Image (cartoon, rainbow, N blue to C red):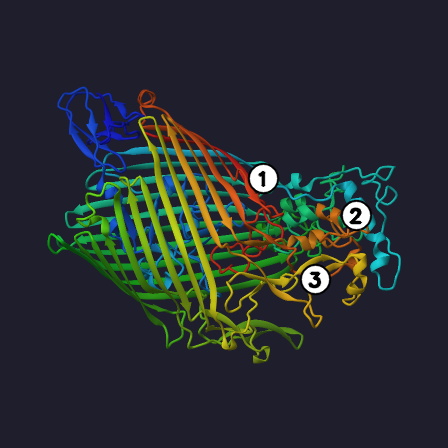
Amino acid sequence: MKGRITDESNLGIPGVTILLKGSNVGTTTDNDGRYSLNLANGTGTLVISSVGYVTQEVPLNNRTTIDVTLKTDVKSLSEVVVIGYGTVKKSDLTGAVTTIKADKLLDMPSANVSQALQGKIAGVEVSVNSNAPGAAAKVRVRGIGSINSNIDPLYVVDGVVGVDGNSINPNDIASLEVLKDASSTAIYGSRGANGVIMISTKRGRKDGTTISYEGFGNISELSRHLKTLNAAEFVKVYNDAYANGQKFDPAGGTWAPPRALNHANFPLLFDANDKPIYDTNWESETYKPSFSQSHQLNIQGGSEKSMFSLSLGYLDQNGLMTTSAFKRYSVKMTLDNELKNWLKLGGNINLIQSTQRMVSDGNGGLNVPRAVTEEVPILPVKYPDGTWAGNNDIAGLEGAPNPVNIANNRYTLNNTMQMLGNVYLLFHISKDLDFKTDFGYNLNSQKNNFYSSQNLAHLSQDQGGVANINAYSNYYWQTENYLTWNKQINERQKLTALLGTSLQRRGQERVRSETQSFIDDIFQWHYQQAGAVKTANESQDDQSSLSSFYARATYNIDDKYLFTATGRYDGSSRFGKNNKYAFFPSVGAAWRISQEDFMKNNRYISNLKVRASYGTSGNQEIGQYRSLAQTQPSTTVLNGATQSSLLPSYIGNPDLKWERSVQADVGLELGMFDDRINLNVDYYNRVTKDLLLQAPIPWSAGETNANVYKNVGSVRNSGIEISLNTVNIKSKDFSWSTNFIFASNKNEVLSLNDGNADIFPGPNFLGQNFIIRVGEPIGSFYGMTRLGTYSTSEADEAAKHNLKPGDRKYLYNPDGTVNYSIIGRAYPKWTGNFSSTVKYKAWDFSFDIRFVQGVNTAANFKHSAEDRQTISNSLATVLNAWTPDNQNTYVSQVRNYKFAQDSHFDTWWVEDGSFIRGQNFMLGYSFPSPIIEKLHIRKLRVYASVQNLFVITKYTGYDPEVDTFNTGYGSNSSFSQNLDFFAYPRPRVWNMGLQLTF
């Protein structure tokens, strides 16, 4: 059996699935649409299907050649989209919903879904701030609308609400939808204010069993370098700094190092000529090329009545930073069974086990990334006798162990076991009415094992080694029960109504223990009782619940006029007794102009729709018991003995209520030339009111927490989103398509507490780094303005501020005080992404370039690496420091750290963080039909790709997209974005992969 499958223009369609109905015998077409198939006889029926075309069933009737023309599936122009508690055709949407299928989502290797989302959807800004193996990215949908509550989007995985979407294996995903406006998110009421990400995982199929394998292996390498002083440069700067001590010593004394850097004092480090023996590049010693691999096996099958799937996944990810790693094992099973024509039973279970070896902990401490820059190059990794070297070997230096030593002897193993899934019953009560009852669950057990060796100076040596265990047991369950009524009123009108109730319960238990003073490092956290000093033994548990009622109605007239109304009534245990419940309504409408009679024969416009929505959603993510006054157990010493005690810890606020977001959205959808050009434009305006804000209270109140949650202030986010998809060329052997997305968000604080006083939310690094001010955006950097350095001709001006030529020069107010102002922004003015795919016969090539513009990144690492000579190594920028012959510079004259000018957060640190990144480049080859038929397979594709091929930026650090102060998923880290205090560098990744289907 052979033939050719073509479209309505008589062009061959590649990749069409041809299957003998009721069997596993099948094949796919080559790039010209041709196929051949070995069959036992000439009876039966061929099922011919391809995405975007109407599936056809063709009887064989003993024919040996069958050519088929597939018709474009009109429904593909309005594909089925998953929304809350149901699905809808894309053409019938009244809200801002973006869908992305698995093949587009996973076009490059990603450890989790948040990383995979980067640059894919307009209005969804993803920041990959930590490049440690297994680390998740920050996802922000349409800006930041909150200050002290969680600002992460709500993840819904196969209907289970509130899942950590980054914990699941991204290879299990079939499709992902992002709900952005009120019309789409209001069905989730109190949890939809930050957007909703709907994830549907792969399930069984009705047309026989398929087995597929996807795997890749890759090499990661350091893509950018942070240049520090080499051995000769370090010795020169070190000696110059002490030589300048007399100038900056108020007493006019002469200063010298505790021990001069020479052979006499350090015979293991200097030769007889006082030249350094070692010139260690700590960057290359610590950040080494690493190999990672991933393997995924999927089995999908079934019949008309019963469908099943099984997937097995394995990821072994190794990081640039030596010894850092992440491993994940996953097993997922699904079953959907039609027991009766009126009853369907189904469900899924997903088991995930992961281990993360984290060695980059401790911002601001002597951790690995900091030691890479600060460890002096005259030291080796190890001395000839095998002992570790470190800054502490040289008197006067800040005594950090070297980074390779830290990475090997100080780490945390984050062990996680998760079981996620649901089970449902679907009752077909009548032709128009269904009832579904669903029970979802998420059980998560996490055990974090930490050990820091007794041989790590200034980290754990004084404690004799430190071991601790943090164990968490988390549970979540939900029950959803809802009726769905689909009514075809008449030929012109359709109505879908939804009415349901939900109950959700979440709880956590935590146990922590810590021991110090070990006789030997061998015991670590494996045997904590080996430590002589018990420093912690504590436990805690909490619970929260949510009870909800929800309804939605959609009304369709002639497929032209579309209306949606949604409401949800939520009650949360987290709020005060007077404000536990709130109602979140929304309305949406759309007009499909292209369906009007005057547009149906238009040669150019194939789809034209305008839509608008307005509604509210809420936020309750502030932790437990914030409305209640609380006491905290503690201990005290009384009469020489330890006694239990209770301390007032939190004053409580019984009037605490929901944070509300009110959002309006207007959208345009345009398809031209049979949808070869698709344009989507959205404008939104979202105002968040009654912000859940931690307001300070006087310490004299006697509470251990000097703040209380209140509903204070409001924030506006407004912006525009543009998505343009084009099929530029489509011919027999060659096609070319492009995709461009653009998003711009304006954030503005509208009001704060009484008097609209400025708020300094932290984190604080040598002063305030951020400010919240009415009229300004959240994420505004706040600091001093550096004008350069004082020249010798400006000695009198410098003296007014007790400074000297060679010191940093700042902007001052007329009264002589230092001027503080907003000096940058941590969030971009606009972002964009341009991708393109070219296919020629069996070959395909694609690239993805990301743009982030109008943003700043604070290089806080300059404090330690540029302002502290004589106690650690420095950035090579100090070679441009002030000297009598080099006075036009922003780097102050080198000097003994004792007389260093105080470091301040200023404009020299806050750099331009805009960038253009070569996100992903891929070249693939799909083996043609004759070859795969001989191999008795359906699909075989090999590909090579590279991620982070280049980044064009003015930023001087490793990468402008960074957050070293708060990288944890699940917390409000809006006030630490783009603060860089020694980051884990972003690698360039060279990847090879294989896709195989039987």
Mark 2 burial class by Cα count in 10 Å: few <14, some 14-19, many 20+: many
Left or right of residue 363: residue 170: left
**195 lies above or below 44:** below
Frontmost residue, 402 versus 77: 77
* Residue under label 1: 223
**Nearest to viewer (mark 1 / mark 3):** 3
* Residue under label 3: 810
* Residue 836 % position (x, y): 41, 37
Mark 1 → mark 2, Cα distance in angstroms: 28 Å
Name the amino acid type tagged 2. Answer: Val
Left or right of residue 534: residue 492: left
The quadrant in which the C terminus is found is top left
Of the numbered discs 2 and 3, the one sitting upstream in the chain is 2
**1 lies above or below 282:** above
Name the amino acid type tagged 1. Answer: Ser
Identity of the residue drawn at 59% across and 80% down: 700
Frontmost residue, 427 versus 846: 846
* Residue 971 % position (x, y): 49, 59
Of the numbered discs 1 and 2, the one sitting upstream in the chain is 1
The quadrant holding residue 439 is bottom left
Name the amino acid type tagged 3. Answer: Tyr
**931 lies above or below 563:** above
For this orientation, the residue located farthest to the left is 490
The answer to whether any part of residue 257 appears in the image is no
Say which element carries label 2: helix
Mark 1 → mark 3, Cα distance in angstroms: 35 Å
